Image (tube, helix red, strand yellow):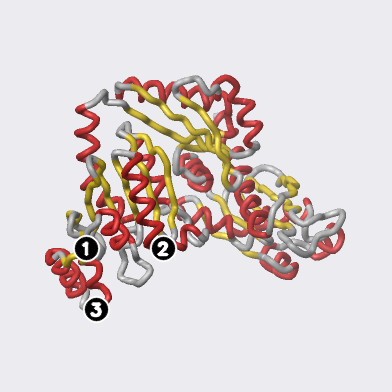
Amino acid sequence: MQAVVISIGDELVLGQTVDTNAAWLSSQLASYGVSTKWQLTVADDREEIQDAITEAAHDAELVIVTGGLGPTEDDLTRFALADALECELVLFENALDHLTSWFEQRGRKMAEANRVQAMLPGKSRMISNTVGTAPGIEASIGDHQIFVFPGVPDEMRVMFKRSIVPLLRDERNATSKRVILARKVNTFGEGESRVAELLGSLADRDRNPLVGTTVSDGIVAVRIRSESTDTEEAEEALNATTRAVEDALGELVFGWDGTTLAEATGQMLKTQCETVATAESCTGGLVGKMLTDTSGSSDYYQGGWVTYSNEMKCEALGVEIGMIEKHGAVSEEVAMAMAEGARTKSGAAFALSLTGIAGPAGGTEEKPVGTVWIGLSESGYSPTAARHVFGGNREMVRLRASLTALDMLRVRLLAKTEVI
C-alpha cells in the first residue's frame, strides 16, 4: 500500500507555521510498512484542494488530508472534498449534537458559524472528534480511501490512531507484512560533511538499513531506516546499525530521535548528581531556558544570571571592571571570570558563561559579529574558555552559541564518566 499526505493551509504555504503533521503521519505509516509516495502542501483554495485530493486518490490507495475543517471562511476542505466526490454537503445531526455538547460542557455559547463543522459530504462518513470540535471525514473514490482530519496535531493524532491504525494492521496481516523501522541518532560538534566522512561505508545507498544525514540548527541527525518482512529482524538490524553509527561517531552522539542537547546534558548532570549555573550576556538567558524546558530540571539547574551590561557583570558576578577595560567584555578573561563568579555564588558544581557579539551591529575587525567566548568553571579546577565565531543572523548566533555551551558541558561530563 502507498499513501499520499496532503496538508492544507495558507499559514503552511507562507511558512508562518511549520507542518509537523506530515512528518508525523509519514513516520507512522512507515512503521506499518506503508510508504508515503508524496506529500503536498496546499493553500486555502477550494479548487486547488479538490485537484489535490483527486490526483492523490488516483495515485495512492490511501489519502490523508489535514487542516481546513474549522468554522471560518477560509476552511474549505469539506467543500473541496464534496466537489471531488461529486456530491453536496449535508448536516450530520450526530456531528451537530457533539458540537452543541462540547460548547455546553465548557459553559460557552456556540457561534452560528460553528454549524458548518457539522456539514459533511453526503457520500462520506463521520469520524468522531474526542479532543476538539471538528469531526473528521472518511470517504472513498473507487477503492482508494480518503481520511480528512483537523490540522490541530493532538486531534489529528487521536483520529489517526483510532480510525487508520486498525486498517493498517489488517493490511499488514493480509500482505507480506513489510515492516519499516526508523531512528535518528543526533550529533553535535561537527558539520554534516564530516559526519558523513566518519560514517564511511555505513552511508552507502545500497545497504539495508539505509543510513543518511540531515542538519537543522547545527544538529546533524543520522537517519537509519530498516526494512524487512519480519519485525524482529528489522529491529535487530536497526539496533546493530545504530551501534555501528555510535561507534563511528563517538562523543559527537548525544541521543536518539527527539532527544535535545539540553535534555541529554541535563540527564548526565542528574546521573552524576552534579549541578550547573549559567551566566549569559549575548544569549540573554537562552541556555537557562533550554535547560529548564525539561521537567525536573531543578534537580540539576541551580539558576542563572543575565548580565548584559558591564555594570551587571561586575555587580552580580564579581567581574573586575579593570579586566573589562583591559580586555573588553567579549574576551577569554571575562568569560572565565563570569563562569567562576556564577559557580561560586550559586554553589553549583559547574557554571557556563557566554559573552559575545550577536549582531548585526557591534562587530570589529578583531572581534567580528558572531564572536562568542564560552566559559566553563568546575569545582576544583581552573576555569577555561573557548572562542567561537558563528555565522548567520542574530538569532542563529545566539542559538548556536547556546548549543555549543551545552555541548561543552556535555563533553566534560562524558570525560568524567570515562575516567570513573
Which numbered disc covers residue 88? Answer: 1
At x 62% / y 25%, what residue is drawn? 198
Q: Residue at x 25, y 65 (%)?
A: 133
Per the image, the residue denoted by label 2 is 44
The amino acid pointed to by label 1 is Glu
Near-viewer residue (369 or 110): 110
Assign a secondary structure to mark 3: helix
Give amino acid for label 3: Glu
242 lies above or below 156: above
According to the picture, the residue beneath numbered tag 3 turns out to be: 112
Q: Is residue 339 left or right of residue 57?
A: right
Nearest to N terminus: mark 3 or mark 1: 1
Q: Position of residue 302 (x, y in %)?
A: 52, 56
Question: Which secondary structure, mark 2?
Answer: loop
Query: From the image, which quarter does the N terminus lie in?
Result: top left
Helix, strand or loop for disc 1 = loop
Q: Residue at x 61, y 45 (%)?
A: 218
Q: Quadrant of the C terminus?
A: top right
Q: Quadrant of residue 416?
A: top right
Q: Is 210 situated left or right of 152 in this image?
A: right
Of badges 1 and 2, nearer the viewer stands 1
